[in-house]
Amino acid sequence: MATNNTKIIKQQRNNSPVQRTVIPVEIRNRLNIKPYDYLEIFTTDDSIVLKKYVQNCVFCGSQDDGQIFKEQYICNNCKQGLKGDQHD
Protein backbone atom coordinates (compact mmCIF):
# COMPACT_ATOMS: atom_id res chain seq x y z
CA MET A 1 0.00 0.00 0.00
CA ALA A 2 2.89 2.39 0.69
CA THR A 3 5.22 3.48 -2.11
CA ASN A 4 8.89 4.41 -1.83
CA ASN A 5 8.12 8.12 -1.32
CA THR A 6 5.26 7.53 1.13
CA LYS A 7 5.78 8.46 4.76
CA ILE A 8 3.73 6.17 6.97
CA ILE A 9 2.14 7.86 9.95
CA LYS A 10 0.66 5.29 12.27
CA GLN A 11 -1.31 6.23 15.37
CA GLN A 12 -4.05 4.65 17.43
CA ARG A 13 -7.13 6.69 18.31
CA ASN A 14 -10.25 5.92 20.29
CA ASN A 15 -13.69 6.55 18.86
CA SER A 16 -15.54 9.22 20.81
CA PRO A 17 -18.88 8.43 22.48
CA VAL A 18 -20.63 9.80 19.37
CA GLN A 19 -18.51 7.57 17.08
CA ARG A 20 -16.13 10.25 15.77
CA THR A 21 -12.44 9.82 15.16
CA VAL A 22 -10.10 12.80 14.76
CA ILE A 23 -7.62 12.69 11.87
CA PRO A 24 -4.20 13.60 13.28
CA VAL A 25 -2.90 17.05 12.32
CA GLU A 26 0.20 15.52 10.70
CA ILE A 27 -1.98 13.62 8.26
CA ARG A 28 -4.31 16.56 7.62
CA ASN A 29 -1.32 18.79 6.87
CA ARG A 30 0.37 16.24 4.62
CA LEU A 31 -2.77 15.72 2.55
CA ASN A 32 -3.79 19.39 2.67
CA ILE A 33 -7.15 18.53 4.26
CA LYS A 34 -8.95 21.68 5.34
CA PRO A 35 -12.16 22.10 7.37
CA TYR A 36 -15.21 21.17 5.28
CA ASP A 37 -13.19 19.28 2.64
CA TYR A 38 -14.93 16.14 1.45
CA LEU A 39 -13.42 12.75 2.15
CA GLU A 40 -14.21 9.49 0.40
CA ILE A 41 -14.83 6.67 2.85
CA PHE A 42 -14.74 3.04 1.76
CA THR A 43 -13.77 -0.35 3.09
CA THR A 44 -11.51 -3.17 2.02
CA ASP A 45 -11.72 -6.65 3.51
CA ASP A 46 -10.52 -5.55 6.95
CA SER A 47 -9.85 -1.81 6.71
CA ILE A 48 -11.62 1.53 6.59
CA VAL A 49 -10.01 3.87 4.05
CA LEU A 50 -10.31 7.66 4.07
CA LYS A 51 -9.21 9.49 0.93
CA LYS A 52 -9.35 13.20 0.15
CA TYR A 53 -12.10 13.62 -2.42
CA VAL A 54 -11.06 15.39 -5.60
CA GLN A 55 -13.73 16.29 -8.12
CA ASN A 56 -13.10 15.48 -11.78
CA CYS A 57 -14.77 17.22 -14.71
CA VAL A 58 -17.61 15.09 -16.07
CA PHE A 59 -16.42 15.80 -19.65
CA CYS A 60 -12.61 15.72 -19.64
CA GLY A 61 -11.67 14.31 -16.22
CA SER A 62 -9.65 17.41 -15.30
CA GLN A 63 -9.23 18.42 -11.66
CA ASP A 64 -8.88 22.10 -12.59
CA ASP A 65 -11.06 24.80 -11.06
CA GLY A 66 -14.70 24.64 -12.02
CA GLN A 67 -18.18 24.46 -10.58
CA ILE A 68 -21.14 22.19 -10.01
CA PHE A 69 -23.93 22.40 -12.60
CA LYS A 70 -27.01 20.20 -12.18
CA GLU A 71 -25.10 17.97 -9.74
CA GLN A 72 -22.16 17.51 -12.17
CA TYR A 73 -18.69 19.06 -11.81
CA ILE A 74 -17.55 20.95 -14.93
CA CYS A 75 -14.08 22.51 -15.26
CA ASN A 76 -13.82 26.11 -16.45
CA ASN A 77 -12.27 25.05 -19.77
CA CYS A 78 -15.18 22.75 -20.65
CA LYS A 79 -17.65 25.36 -19.39
CA GLN A 80 -16.18 27.88 -21.85
CA GLY A 81 -16.44 25.26 -24.63
CA LEU A 82 -20.10 24.73 -23.84
CA LYS A 83 -20.74 28.48 -24.03
CA GLY A 84 -18.91 28.83 -27.35
CA ASP A 85 -20.47 28.51 -30.79
CA GLN A 86 -20.52 24.81 -31.64
CA HIS A 87 -21.44 25.33 -35.32
CA ASP A 88 -18.29 25.42 -37.50
Image (cartoon, helix red, strand yellow):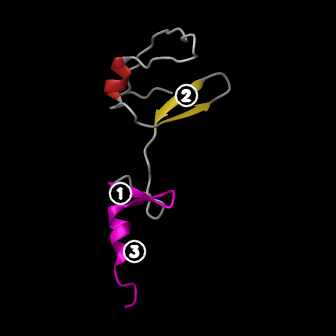
Q: Are marks 2 and 3 in contact (CB under 8 Å)?
A: no
Q: Secondary structure at mark 2?
A: strand
- What's the mark number on residue 82? 3
Q: Is residue 66 left or right of residue 41?
A: left
Distance from disc 3 to disc 1, alpha carbons, whole Å, reads: 13 Å
Q: Kindly identify the residue that appears in the image at 43 percent across and 29 percent down.
A: 3
Q: Is residue 41 magenta?
A: no
* First of labels 2, 1 by sequence position: 2
Which comes before the other along the chain, label 3 or label 1?
A: 1
Which residue lies most toward the bottom here?
88
Amino acid type of disc 1? Gly
Residue ranking furthest to the right: 45
Residue 76 shown in magenta: yes
- Residue 46 - label: none
The one of 85 and 18 positioned closer to us in this rendering: 18
Q: Tell me the SS state at disc 1.
A: strand
Q: Which residue is mark 1?
A: 66
- Please provide percent x and percent y for residue 4: 39, 27
- Callout 3: helix, strand or loop? helix
Instruction: Report the span colored magenta.
Output: 65-88
| Residue 70 left/right relative to 33 | right
Q: Amino acid at mark 3?
A: Leu
Amino acid type at circle 2 is Val
What residue is rendered at 61% in x and 23% in y?
47
Above or below, comparing residue 42 to residue 86 in the picture: above
Residue at (38% x, 67% y) in the render: 78
First in sequence: mark 2 vs mark 3? 2
Badge number at residue 49:
2
Front position in the image: 28 or 1: 28
Image location (x, y in percent) of residue 8 = 41, 19
Locate residue 18: give its quadrant.
Answer: top right
